[in-house]
């Protein structure tokens, strides 16, 4: 019988998108999710997914999910820098202890490889651009610390136990499945929702801060490449992005173009834990897993706006 691909946090935005892509390739797919931030509606269209409802901090639930698994795509986490500032204990429990449980059960269950959803927040607010994986890290939030700790765990488990691991440092992933209703919603769904509802988008800071926005299709592709590469993996860290630097003000301009009217943002104070500028070097991703972005930010934004517009019926 074919081995199983397990997606932790598989009901989330990124996790469910990975599930969809794996199913399209004919793979057996299992999900473990406690639905604290993931949505059941993300899994409803996906026929054939085996769902284990439970938390990644529960070794018994994780052991049940790991049966006959070959590759784990470890996406489960409590996301958001802002959420971690509000509740650091919850972020650390899920993101650090949960990752420890996933790795420990994986190595005991004979899992071959764990692909970890790391975060560009590990770099912090260092001024050097683009961000290269060999740079010193300087996390500025509990979330960033938790994700950087996950990277260390991946390397340690590869070194001690021989399980293959790789860390994909995501840069500002966005796409149609993001939840605009959450108080911790990411900037793109926030801005698009404001445009569709005729409201003023809220910007934390002067809007000149920059990000390397990465459309979901690129992130999914990176995970599948990392899961299937014949290269031996031992905790390597690689950036997953487009290598494009876009300011929030430029982003507002693009969304205004999609909406057919310029947006009038409301500027406010910067948020604790936010970084000023972000831009990725993706050379290591090219070399290690053969990654190239397939949808650049402007096209991804067009697709995302169209999906939100259809959802709103406008």
Image (cartoon, grey):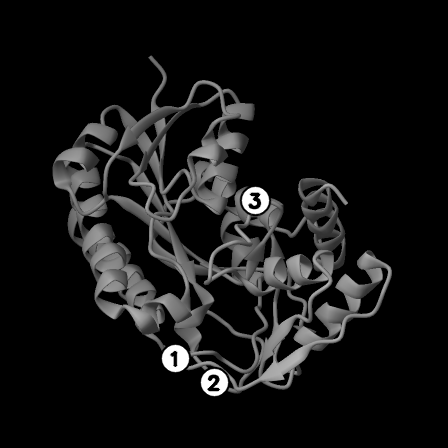
- List x then y, in percent, for residue 114: 32, 44
Q: Is residue 247 positioned above or below 312 on the image?
A: below
Image quadrant holding the C terminus, namely top right
Quickly name the residue at label 2: 126
Mark 2 neighbour density, 10 Å: few (under 14) some (14–19) many (20 or more): some
Q: Residue at x 67, y 72 (%)?
A: 245
Q: Residue at x 36, y 43 (%)?
A: 9
Q: Residue at x 67, y 41 (%)?
A: 311
- List x then y, in percent, for residue 74: 35, 45
Q: Is residue 25 positioned above or below 97 on the image?
A: above
Whether pointer 2 and pointer 3 mark residues with C-beta atoms closer than 8 Å, the reply is no
Mark 1 or mark 3, earlier in chain: 1
Front-most of residues 225 and 62: 62
Quickly name the residue at label 1: 136
Q: Is residue 304 left or right of residue 180?
A: right
Q: Is residue 64 left or right of residue 31?
A: left
Work out how far the residue at label 2 is from the one at label 1, CA to CA, in angstroms.
Answer: 9 Å
Whether pointer 2 and pointer 1 mark residues with C-beta atoms closer than 8 Å, the reply is yes
SS category of the residue bearing label 3: loop
Work out how far the residue at label 2 is from the one at label 3, CA to CA, in angstroms.
Answer: 31 Å
Work out how far the residue at label 1 is from the one at label 3, CA to CA, in angstroms.
Answer: 33 Å
Q: Nearer the viewer, mark 2 or mark 1?
A: 2
SS category of the residue bearing label 1: loop
User: In the picture, residue 180 is in which quadrant?
Assistant: bottom right
- List x then y, in percent, for residue 110: 20, 32
User: In the picture, residue 202 is in which quadrant?
Assistant: bottom right
Mark 3 neighbour density, 10 Å: few (under 14) some (14–19) many (20 or more): some
Residue farthest to the right, as pictured: 260
Quickly name the residue at label 3: 177
Mark 2 or mark 3, earlier in chain: 2
């Amino acid at each position: 019988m074919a081995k199983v691909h397990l997606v932790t946090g598989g009901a989330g935005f990124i996790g469910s998108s990975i599930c969809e892509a794996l199913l399209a390739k004919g793979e057996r797919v299992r999900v473990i999710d406690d639905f604290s931030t993931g949505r059941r509606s993300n899994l409803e269209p996906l026929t054939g997914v085996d769902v284990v409802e439970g938390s990644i901090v529960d070794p018994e639930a994780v052991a049940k999910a790991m049966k006959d698994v070959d590759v784990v795509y470890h996406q489960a986490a409590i996301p958001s820098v802002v959420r971690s500032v509000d509740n650091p204990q919850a972020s650390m429990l899920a993101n650090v202890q949960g990752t420890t449980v996933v790795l420990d059960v994986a190595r005991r269950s004979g899992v071959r490889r764990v692909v970890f959803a790391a975060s560009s927040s590990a770099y912090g607010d260092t001024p050097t651009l683009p961000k290269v994986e060999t740079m010193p890290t300087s996390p500025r939030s509990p979330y960033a610390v938790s994700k950087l700790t996950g990277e260390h765990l991946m390397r340690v488990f590869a070194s001690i136990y021989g399980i293959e691991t790789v860390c994909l440092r995501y840069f500002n992933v966005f796409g149609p499945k993001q939840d605009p209703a959450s108080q911790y919603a990411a900037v793109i769904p926030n801005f698009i929702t404001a445009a569709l509802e005729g409201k003023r988008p809220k910007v934390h800071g002067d809007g000149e801060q920059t990000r390397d926005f990465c459309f979901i299709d690129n992130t999914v592709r990176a995970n599948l490449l990392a899961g299937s590469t014949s290269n031996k993996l031992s905790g390597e860290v690689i950036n997953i992005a487009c290598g494009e630097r876009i300011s929030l003000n430029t982003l507002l301009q693009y969304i205004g173009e999609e909406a057919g009217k310029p947006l009038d943002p409301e500027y406010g104070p910067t948020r604790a834990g936010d970084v000023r500028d972000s831009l990725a070097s993706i050379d290591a991703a090219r070399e290690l897993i053969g990654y190239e972005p397939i949808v650049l930010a402007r096209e991804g934004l067009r697709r995302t706006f169209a999906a939100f517009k259809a959802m709103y019926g406008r």
